Amino acid sequence: MRSRIAPLLLVSMLCLAPSPAKAAADPAPTETTWMTVLLNGRKIGHEEIQRVQLGNTVTTTQTLVMAIERSHKVVPYVNVSRSVETVTGVPISFTMTSTMSATEAKVEGRRLTNGTLELSNTVGGRTHQSITNWPDGAVLVEGQRKAMQAAIAHPGMHYHMLVYNQGSQQPMDLLVRVIGNERVPLDNHVETLSHQQETLRTVENTQTVDLWLDADGNIRKGSASLLGRPMDMIACSEACAEAPEQTLDMMSEAMVDSPRLLTPEMLADFLSYRVHVTNKAIFKPFISTDQQSVTDLGNGEWLVNVYRSELDDERPPTPADTQPNAWLQSDAPEIKALAALAAGGERNKSHIMGNLNAFVSRYLSKRGLDIGYASALEVARDRRGDCAEYAVLLAAMARAEDIPARVVVGMLYADRYDGKQRVFVPHAWVVAWVRGHWQSFDPATVRFDTGHIALDISDGNPWHFFNATNEFGSIQIDAVKTFGEMYGLMPGNATGGAAGAAGGGAGAK
């Protein structure tokens, strides 16, 4: 899913042209390479890569096809990326179009002569344009291939490479280690390839991708992890790549078991979670908010406390929190009209947010698990979706009313979901700046409760949702305690079943 499912693996591998370069005098034939995508040994997709060199220009087109299953609904996913560079690897322009079911998002970038980057994001038929600085030294496909080819002859060497990520529209500073030549089994043969390992370190985690390259620096195999399971992309024949695939059930793979039943009474009050994160490369799996505090206990152990009241710990909003963007089109006439209608003439921002939240809860007339990830404008028009669509619409309507708002990505407790009991599932909601605090609102479940655990926060870009979801395979919730159980005010069993009526969030993603 390119930079949505396994961000570093797919960006790295789709940013390398596996076909050998031709001489400039060649009549510029289209060179095609096929790859199969495997998750835990199961084929879940394929990729076609075409490379054309014409004069001083190299154009690489990559088409990734996968079938994502969500609650037994198959959602086709296609990502087409095209980069144009000089033969020396200097970026000229790029485009990336992602289609999931009926939802399409397109980003176009063009480097201007003054060194800036002209960006155009089109989502839901509306285009958002901006100009930003091109990250100095950042490369695309051909530039990455040439850098890795030059490093093949230096086993043991470490070097940095700045790769522009079209999905997040940010540069990735990769630390690359050249391990050396290895014999690698591929489709039906063995090749001697250069093993190089890329590491992307952020404040939240470290992501590592192992790549095996031929003598021209072309990718032949790549391995990383997704949802705690090994994920591989392997060069093979067209017949191999296009062989029948098994769908990837993201929701089933991402569910996290709850150690106990959480009753409505518990969810309406304070809850403390003792969590174990098995992947030690994840430095910061949870975020602090004005309704969630996080303590690192060491050795992968975390204490997450969730409150209904505000903590007043987080920084106030920035101007960007009220501005429109490609996914939160708060300046669109449809969004502004809906926000004005829902606000109902209220002037108090807290009351306005309450009205907006209630309006969005009722406005979506149909839950659409086959949508993928729609923008606020698409949701306003189609009136269907799930938690992410509820969240982006509410955030955009809040911004249309000049209320700072952000989209939170996390997990939500549900008594029952897709045949499973007592689980946490991927979820999204909104925080808005009212009464001098960031207050949480969840239109998908009508009200925010302490069954919400926040992992990340964003401006609505789906990159954050899919990136955070990737952490689920490493999260284990070992214990849940109420305030009374924490401080010995009442008996309880923090890891077993608890008496009480079944309750909890029912509007999970």
Image: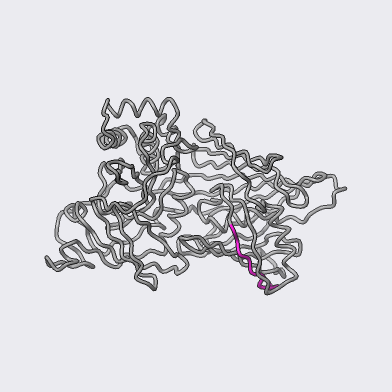
The region drawn magenta spans 173-185
Q: Is residue 177 magenta?
A: yes
Residue 91, position as x, y percentages in the image:
70, 47
Judged from this view, the residue extending furthest toward the left is 490
Q: Residue at x 33, y 42 (%)?
A: 432
Residue 116, position as x, y percentages in the image:
65, 42
Judged from this view, the residue extending furthest toward the right is 25
Residue 416 visible from this viewpoint: no
> Is residue 283 positioned above or below 323 on the image?
below
Q: Is residue 97 left or right of residue 60?
A: left
> Is residue 241 positioned above or below 190 on the image?
above
Which secondary structure is most common in the magenta stretch? strand
Residue 1 visible from this viewpoint: yes
Q: Residue at x 29, y 66 (%)?
A: 274
Residue 128, position as x, y percentages in the image:
53, 34
Q: Which residue occupies the foreground of this view, 400 or 123?
A: 400
* Residue 175 in which image quadrant: bottom right
